[in-house]
Image (cartoon, helix red, strand yellow):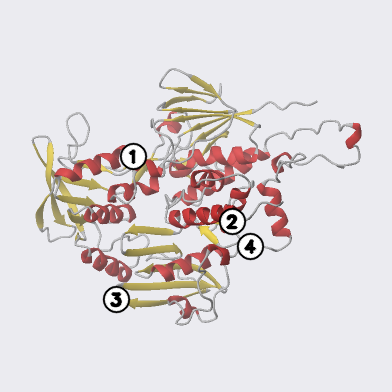
């Protein structure tokens, strides 16, 4: 019998990407790795994407907690910060004095909120004045929610995705909100000026005052607490005004956490420099994923991108594991199996259900589905650049080729619908019969259709103008019951989870929504599918109870 020595993997960072990597490894080879996770925050992993929902009061803190890794060979040390890396000895030292040897080290340290160097923003000790917050972690969200109790007015600095979500969330709590942005167009990385104007009108319709092309020049502090912010025009005509507020939220970008890597002699630039294989060019045993990483293709700071990196790195690490030699078969089983199975397929024993990889493999080879569903091989995360803003009644979705910086390729055809009075702007970009980019403001139904076409790479109509509107007459009535949904209907687009995947997990023994979430990862992205998943699980449970037991 050949016994395999587990590969020691140390993961520094227990956020959405670090925890996803651990999950990806466990789904492939649960016995092949000894995994140690060092997480600086004392909490269980949580969905950082939903922090703005916590601020808005749409989601409770307990609801954004993500499942803990479930494996005998996984050690999670929460509230423990990694302080140094000895690459020669291959050991990570933590702040509590413990040492953690590794065969492979994965840095998933994320990014910190960027705080601009403006007068009044830093106290003598280096901290922020009372009433001034970033929105980057769970503590930030809790402090902002607590501050809303005694702050009738708020200022949000930064008109990117998170800034818009924070402004809308605070306005939804009844605060008078002013949004300050340093350029003319909101979400300038994703939206062209015409689309940004529609978004601005939508925000103003929710009672939010928007100050574009404005700089925050000073935070006004009295008695150690912020009382307002001085704003001036970002041009030659320096108009200044003071906006009174006891709550100021900064959302002006992030700075990748590279200090640990730089101190270890690893190449860093804006982030930790890695190759297409996500390994450092200085040390093939050190990898970086998520917001802290700087791959050759750059980083957009989106969670789907980090999840895709976690999947790819898990596949790489599994490929480096020495396969287990099959044991000599019992005499009664000679001839039953010609060769030993690949370890990652985890073929069932006599009474076990086939693994997800086996079942999906059979479906794919038979042509039964073309879904991007979860398997033991990970998730085919196409469309990792879909941006969906959670801004209450205002729907904003972008994907792929969009915004003012998009390339003007000869093979691309763009058509748009601009209806600013109705609060609607839709643009689609098509190349070679495929949707390669889109911007959709004010029409969530069209946005959902475009997202499906983009992520699935489905062929589009010869005239792409048909993509700009929902059909006047539906080709098929929407499913009145989950019974009428096809099994390959995608329920959770963030993770590519289909109705069939949820049904399979229930059939395999998942009885509650939490158990389904653990098995399929549904609802752990943007969270917009939670009601659909809950309804589907309830329907599956009722359907199973309605079937009489065989006599």
Res 269 → quadrant: top left
Image coordinates of residue 62 in percent, x first then y, are 37, 41
Q: Indicate the secondary structure of the residue bearing disc 4.
A: loop
Whether label 4 touches label 1, CB < 8 Å: no
Q: Callout 4: 10 Å neighbours few (<14), some, many (20+)?
A: few
Instruction: Say whether residue 405 is left or right of residue 140.
Output: right
The residue that mark 4 highlights is: 370
Which numbered circle lies on residue 164?
A: none
State the residue in front, 493 or 109. Answer: 493
Answer whether residue 280 is visible to the viewer in this image: no
Cα–Cα gap, marks 1 and 3:
36 Å
292 or 444, which is in the foreground? 444
- Dot label at residue 138: 1
The residue labelled by disc 2 is: 546
Q: Residues within 10 Å of mark 1 (few under 14, many from 20)?
A: some
* Distance between the alpha carbons at the discs numbered 3 and 4: 37 Å
Within 10 Å of the Cα at label 3, are there few (<14), some (14-19), or many (20+) other Cα atoms? Answer: few
- As helix, strand or loop, the secondary structure at mark 1 comes to helix
Would you name the residue on which mark 3 appears? 422
Q: CA distance from mark 1 to mark 2?
A: 42 Å
Q: CA distance from mark 4 to mark 1?
A: 37 Å
Q: Which badge, 1 or 3, is on the more N-terminal residue?
A: 1
Give the alpha-carbon distance from disc 4 to disc 2, as whole Å: 30 Å
Q: Please state, as top left, top right, bottom left or bottom right, where the N terminus lies in the image.
A: top right
Residue 116 in the image: above or below residue 4 = below
């Amino acid at each position: 019998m050949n016994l395999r020595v587990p590969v020691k993997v140390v993961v520094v960072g227990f956020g959405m990407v670090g925890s996803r990597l651990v999950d990806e490894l466990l789904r492939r080879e649960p016995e092949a790795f000894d995994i140690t996770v060092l997480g600086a925050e004392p909490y269980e992993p949580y969905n950082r994407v939903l922090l703005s929902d916590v601020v808005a009061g749409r989601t409770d803190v307990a609801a954004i907690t993500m499942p803990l890794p479930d494996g005998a060979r996984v050690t999670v040390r929460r509230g423990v910060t990694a302080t140094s890396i000895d690459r020669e000895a291959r050991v990570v030292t933590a702040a509590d004095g413990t040492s953690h040897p590794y065969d492979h080290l994965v840095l998933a340290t994320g990014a910190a909120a960027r705080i601009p160097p403006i007068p009044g923003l830093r106290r003598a000790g280096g901290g922020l004045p009372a009433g001034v917050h970033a929105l980057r972690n769970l503590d930030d969200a809790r402090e902002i929610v607590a501050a809303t109790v005694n702050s009738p007015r708020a200022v949000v600095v930064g008109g990117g995705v998170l800034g818009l979500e924070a402004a809308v969330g605070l306005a939804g709590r009844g605060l008078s909100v002013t949004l300050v942005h340093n350029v003319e167009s909101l979400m300038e990385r994703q939206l062209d000026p015409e689309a940004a104007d529609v978004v601005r009108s939508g925000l103003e319709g929710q009672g939010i005052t928007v100050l574009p092309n404005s700089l925050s020049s000073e935070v006004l502090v009295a008695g150690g607490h912020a009382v307002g912010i001085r704003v001036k025009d970002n041009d030659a005509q320096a108009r200044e005004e003071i906006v009174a507020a006891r709550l100021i939220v900064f959302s002006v970008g992030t700075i990748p956490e590279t200090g640990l890597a730089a101190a270890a002699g690893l190449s860093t630039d804006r982030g930790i420099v890695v190759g297409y294989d996500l390994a450092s060019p200085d040390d093939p045993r050190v990898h970086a994923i998520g917001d802290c990483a700087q791959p050759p293709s750059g980083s957009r700071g989106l969670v789907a991108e980090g999840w895709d990196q976690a999947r790819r790195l898990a596949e790489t690490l599994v490929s480096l594991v020495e396969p287990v030699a099959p044991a000599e078969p019992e005499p009664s089983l000679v001839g039953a199996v010609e060769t030993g199975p690949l370890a990652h397929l985890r073929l069932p024993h006599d009474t076990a259900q086939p693994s997800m990889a086996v079942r999906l493999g059979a479906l794919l080879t038979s042509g039964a589905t073309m879904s991007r569903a979860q398997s033991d091989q990970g998730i085919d995360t196409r469309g990792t650049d879909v941006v969906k803003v959670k801004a209450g009644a205002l729907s904003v979705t972008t994907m792929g080729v969009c915004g003012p910086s998009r390339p003007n390729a000869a093979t691309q055809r763009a058509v748009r619908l601009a209806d600013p009075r109705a609060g609607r702007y839709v643009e689609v970009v098509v190349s070679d019969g495929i949707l390669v980019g889109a911007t959709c403001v004010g029409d969530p139904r069209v946005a959902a259709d475009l997202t499906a076409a983009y992520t699935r790479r489905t062929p589009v109509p010869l005239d792409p103008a048909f993509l700009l509107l929902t059909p006047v007459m539906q080709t098929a009535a929407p499913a009145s019951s989950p019974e009428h949904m096809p099994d390959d209907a995608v329920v959770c687009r963030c993770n590519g989870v289909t109705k069939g995947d949820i049904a399979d997990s229930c059939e395999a023994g998942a009885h509650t929504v939490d158990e389904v979430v653990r098995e399929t990862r549904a609802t752990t992205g943007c969270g917009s599918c939670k009601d659909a998943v809950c309804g589907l699980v309830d329907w599956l449970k009722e359907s199973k109870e309605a079937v009489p037991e065989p006599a």
